[in-house]
Image: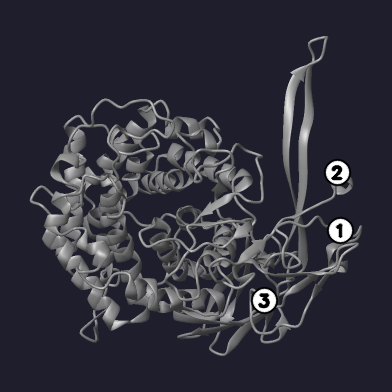
Amino acid sequence: MTNEGERVKSNEERGNGRDGERGGAVPRPAGLRPPLPRQVELHGPLGDALAANLRGRLSRFIVDETSPAIALFAPERVRGNHEGDWYGEHAGKWLYAAAKAAARSGDAALAASVRRVADYLVSRQDEDGYLGNYAPERRFMRKQPPKPVSWNGEPALRTWDVWTHSYLVLGLLEAHRHIPEPRYLQAARRIGDLCLRTLDGGIAITELGNHFGMSATVLMEPAVELYFATGERRYLDLAERVLAQADAEPQLALLRRALAGADASEIATGKAYQLIWNLVGVLKLHRATGKPEYREAVERLWGNIREHHLSLGGGPWGGVAHRSREVFNAPGAFVPQGYIETCSVLAWLQLNRELLALTGHARYAEEIERTAYNDLIGAQAPDGEDWCYYSYANGKRVHTTYWRCCKSSGAMALEELPGVAYAADEAGVRVHLYGPGTAQLETAQAGAVELRQRTRYPFDGAVRIEVAPARPARFVVALRLPAWAEGFQPRVNGTPVPAEAGDDGYLRVAREWRAGDAIEFDLPLRPRLHRRTHRNVQESRAPDGAPVAQEVLRYDYAAISRGALVYAVGGLIDGYKTEETVKLPQAPCEAWIEPLADAGEGADLLLHAEGRPPLRLQPYYRAGGRAHGAWRFVWLPLPPEDAR
């Protein structure tokens, strides 16, 4: 990050970052070493989204203390705030994303804004450590009145105070990683200490947030991050106390239910964003403590969400027949109009980031790539400022209003991508995400290694990765094997080379590398047909008492993906329809999916169904144009005779 035009050495470079040595902080177990933000440049659709994020949301939404999201913290505003709103979260979210963006881009104006906003927030912190925007009588340190039973588990007085402080801790810690100002770390510590004193005083964390406490138990992640940053045991104790109280709440019982194999929809209210953020905290607790039950609980729920609760574009979805649009459905429930909340996309991406760092398994990078190329950038407008709160596989694109949470969550999610695209490990370097760009990685064998991807992926499967080590050395270049690719043969300098496919999802090329070497391979971008069913089964008993299950409702759907991209009909079908039943030919989909000429941002596809003119499909993220009000249709109904 820069200050007055000069680059300041970050705390991570000084060895005082999240996994540094000071205070006994804990290293990442998997041995993956992600690059610093400034060491990665992404191009193509992801790079375009990052560039728009920088010039749009991050540079315009907050500039200084007069920006509305920061003016909330002015003393006169705080004294009068009895509303119980979540708006204070934007400060921490923006600090987190803007600090990363300024560090990767070297943008001096954004760096100055981060410093000015962080300084202002620190100046507003009370002596006891409070840094929220609630009036004194509504603060989380005051015990709540008796809690009535409610469908969404809200406390008697609606509050997002702990939630706001959780994001402030994360934002201040991220600013501290890139700006060597001890006061930012100290402010974050004082919040942690206030939370610890509050729980010591007999207030349970589950009394301080809705969804039976899940909106407050998210404090686990910032508490563990405080421990990683300082090595001070009390913050680890705080995180474990939060988890213990979350487990003791009967409607939540986070750890117990996860270990018992519960579906994600059965934990508290099944609120996707909060539940997944809680899982991030539990996984970081595993990193800090080594307790296997923490990891097991997270991996069980990750598998459940992956299997039952993701859209085709990789975003958590739900909200069908619920009072809340943002909760998981029962497993197996499907309708094409399900809600994909951009905040939940952020949490899912961060959970996969942590699992990738912990395990080193490519399946988590696969999920990040699928989410990034579809539901994440599919929610962002080209101006980088507007976002969809909710996206739909089938539905209208609606850009949300000023204060909505998802605009800041989308900006955060994008800034995670450079840090997960590549990594170094003890054997060499890894490529996690495919797409044009460059990375600088540090290896034990060759010192600095530059990787440069020259490719039009995700639109084209031809990938060339130029490898430029600082000195000739033998090391491994590990290439993620996409689950949808049937295999590929790497070539080095034009010659096929042996490669070892590991059970962790990577293809490894080990050799002595020299500047000028290049790996080339072709990922087979074949169209793939997906089927889903919306059905209802009525259970009864026969006269003899035997159980009988009768299907009383069934609608079947089909969708197309190609490589990492999901495709959709853009705009109303035939100019006026919001649905169209298609009869698909009885042949492999390559026979009736026709790629058109690539006009620069990926080829459109023609779907040749029987009995109607071809339907034009586009990559979902840009289908129908990226303007407010545009329609997109991923899932096409099938006729009843094709349903079985």
Q: Position of residue 483 (x, y in %)?
A: 68, 60
Q: Which residue lies furthest to the front in this view?
A: 576
The residue closer to the viewer here, 215 or 521, is 215
Numbered badge on residue 459: 3
Cβ–Cβ below 8 Å for labels 2 and 3?
no
Identified by mark 1, the residue type is Leu
Identified by mark 2, the residue type is Arg
Q: Where is residue 515 in the image (x, y as percent from the top left)?
A: 53, 89
Element under disc 2: loop
Identified by mark 3, the residue type is Phe
Q: Distance between the residues labelled 1 and 3?
A: 24 Å
Q: Disc 2 designates what residue?
A: 644
Q: In which quarter of the image is residue 502?
A: bottom right
| Pointer 2 or 3: first along the chain | 3
Viewer-nearest of discs 1 and 3: 1
Q: Disc 1 designates what residue?
A: 584
Q: How far apart are marks 2 and 3 (CA)?
A: 33 Å
| Residue 138 higher or lower than 92, as above or below | above
The residue closer to the viewer here, 239 or 603, is 603
Compared across the picture, whether 591 is left or right of 107 comes to right
Q: Where is residue 534 in the image (x, y as percent from the top left)?
A: 72, 42
Compared across the picture, whether 480 is left or right of 57 comes to right
Cβ–Cβ below 8 Å for labels 1 and 3?
no
| Residue 474 higher or lower than 260, as above or below | below
The answer to whether residue 597 shows anywhere in this view is yes
At a point 19% along the width and 50% down the height, the residue shown is 191
Give the crowd class for mark 1: few <14, some 14-19, many >=20 residues within 10 Å: some
Give the crowd class for mark 2: few <14, some 14-19, many >=20 residues within 10 Å: few
| Pointer 1 or 2: first along the chain | 1
Viewer-nearest of discs 2 and 3: 2
| Residue 486 higher or lower than 340, as above or below | below
At a point 20% along the width and 66% down the height, the residue shown is 118
